[in-house]
Image: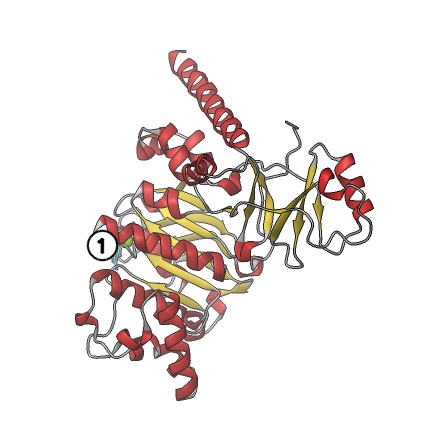
Amino acid sequence: MSDTVTEPAVPADRDDSAGIELIGVSKRFPGQDTPAVDDVTLSIPGGRIVVLLGPSGSGKTTTMRLINRLIEPTAGKITVAGRDALGLDPGELRRRIGYVIQDAGLFPHMTVATNIGLVPQMLKWDKKRIAARVDELLELVDLPPAAFRDRYPRELSGGQQQRVGVARALAADPPVMLMDEPFGALDPITRELLQDSLLRLQEELGKTIVFVTHDIDEALKIGDRIAILDKGSRVAQYGTPQEILLNPADEYVARFIGGGQAMRLLKFGRVGDVALRAVPEAGPGDDAAHVRERIANGDTSFAIVLDAGRRPLRWITLDDLAGASGPIGERGSGTAPPIRARDTLQQALESLIQIDHEWVPVVGPRGVYQGTVTLGTLQQALRDMRARAAGETVAHEAGEAR
Ligand SMILES: Nc1ncnc2c1ncn2[C@@H]1O[C@H](COP(=O)(O)OP(=O)(O)O)[C@@H](O)[C@H]1O
Ligand SMILES: [Mg+2]
């Protein structure tokens, strides 16, 4: 096995311009002794899901409502997609920011279609365009339009209402979504289903999502990054799920995340965060001699053939290329179904154990190839993580003993 690895893959097609910056933001409600939000500075990258995780009363909802200006800050600066949020018309700002709350907040006297079409209607889209958009969004959130568009909210389950809430927030295709404990009132099974739907949706849409929860497992599952908040929205730690699991910044964070670290790494660690194996790449139009040379210069005996959209097609070995000249065309043999960068380490292990291929390509949004993984890669990644975690625990205990 070679030691060649690539850096953890970062999807290149995210809209990094749609980030949110909070700079020294405070909110003190009239009559409050301590501010609900106290001098918070946080940089939320575009196209990612950032989770605000903290106990009840820590200021999560207030922080969200400062971003869409349902609440005005007493101090500080907020930019959304590079523009000064406080300088924009609040109505205009809110049309660029989808907002989903715990009880979906649907209007009970309006049909599903009317609820979803509210913002497009405000934007004066014509009827046909709104109807088409409503159906498109219902499909997107897995509610068949014919069955759902004319129903009223009371005729839907909690999970279905929440899906409609998400569709409504997405109606005018805002670059930013704020989701305040959106699945908090749902039973555990429905909740998991909606979490999975959201992750699938996000893989397609690449929105900037700020997601509030007080549930650590939900945060680990959903978040690209997690901000762990203490009172006044003080940011106790801001990092990837893996960083936070392996390296809690202080006692407060350690207490908040609790035990079961090894299982959580497996359950929530993502394939995309693992250093993937690099393999020589080729396209069907590449010349056989060049591909042979690329393989000879690498440390595997094969290359991966990608289509024009960089989606994996086949493995091609030196044997497949023996005596060949001109374009490699359809030589080689098909890869196993790719593992998604979004998959957890546990899901990846399950597929690797079940399939008959040692090497499996890893793909990101739109099936774009990001690197290759083997059982050995995952084993090594888990071993490294555990070693790092153990090293840190020892250091921590040594520190405490002193
Ligand atoms: N409109 C308000 N007026 C006065 N105090 C408020 C108001 N909204 C929230 N608070 C207070 O601000 C603090 C943070 O609340 P909130 O942002 O709702 O926290 P979280 O969403 O994390 O539970 C709490 O102490 C809460 O009581
Ligand atoms: Mg709240």
Which one is in front, 339 or 66? 339
**Left or right: 112 in relation to 52:** left
Quadrant for the C terminus, please: top left
| Amino acid at the residue labelled 1 | Leu
Against 83, is 223 above or below?
A: above
Residue at the image point whose x is 42% and y is 40% from the top? 347
Mark 1 Cα-neighbour bin, 10 Å: few <14, some 14–19, many ≥20: some
**Left or right: 49 in relation to 108:** right
Residue 310 image point, x, y percent: 64, 54
Which one is in front, 266 or 167? 266
Residue 251 image point, x, y percent: 35, 28
Q: Residue furthest front?
A: 323
Quadrant for the N terminus, please: top right
Against 157, is 118 above or below?
A: below
Q: Residue furthest top?
A: 402
> How many numbered callouts?
1
Against 155, is 347 above or below?
A: above
Residue at the image point whose x is 37% and y is 63% from the top? 72
Q: How is the image coloured?
A: secondary structure
Can residue 187 be seen? Answer: yes
Residue at the image point whose x is 54% and y is 51% from the top? 364
Q: Secondary structure at mark 1?
A: loop
Residue behind mark 1: 186
Against 67, is 36 above or below?
A: above
